[in-house]
Structure formats: C-alpha cells, structure tokens
Image: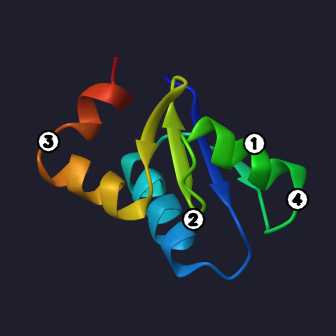
Amino acid sequence: MPKIEIYTQPFCPYCKQALELFKQKGVTVQEISAPRGTPERETAIERSGGRKTVPQIFIDGNHIGGCDDLIALDRKGGLDPLLNH
C-alpha cells in the first residue's frame, strides 16, 4: 500500500473531492490539516515546489499536484498503478 499524504484546509471543496476519490479507490490517506499561516501549509508549499493552493497530494513522496491534477491522472489511467503497486 503506498503512502498517500494530502494537505488540506477546512471547508475546501477541492480537498473533499480529492479525499472522496481516494475513498472510492479504497485506499488509506494521511490527511494533514494545513490552513493558511500554519507550519503545515509552509511545508506543503515547500514540498510542492511553491504551489500555495490546497489540496497538495503526494503518493510515496512524489508530488501529484492538486485536485484537478489527481482527477486528470485518474482519467488517463495513471492513478490506479500508483495505488496498486
């Protein structure tokens, strides 16, 4: 099972959408609360190469991107291989 980390903030519809996709896939996710101004948000920005939006998603330490990136990866068939290795 891969290590999936997702940096989120409360009331973020994109965060909820990404979490729901992972739930549908049946995988465990480490959700990291990262509201603006927190050390966790700064870590997310640093790890993502400067992206300031949430969610920021990492699978086995590799940056996937945000919600739109995750959905695009799934639609082209690239997500399942990352989740089932």
Q: Circle 1 sits on which residue?
A: 43
Tag 4 or tag 2, which sits nearer the N-term? 4
Q: Are marks 2 and 4 in contact (CB under 8 Å)?
A: no
Q: Is residue 24 above or below residue 5?
A: below
Give the CA distance from mark 2 to mark 1: 12 Å
Between residue 61 and residue 19, name the one nearer to us. Answer: 61
Residue 85's x, y, as percent?
34, 17
Residue type beneath disc 1: Thr
Between residue 12 and residue 20, name the one nearer to us. Answer: 12
Q: Is residue 33 above or below residue 47?
A: below
Residue type beneath disc 4: Thr
Disc 2 on helix, strand or loop?
Answer: loop
Tag 1 or tag 4, which sits nearer the N-term? 4
Residue 78's x, y, as percent?
20, 37
Tag 3 or tag 1, which sits nearer the N-term? 1
Q: Circle 4 sits on which residue?
A: 38
Residue 25 bears which disc, if any? Answer: none
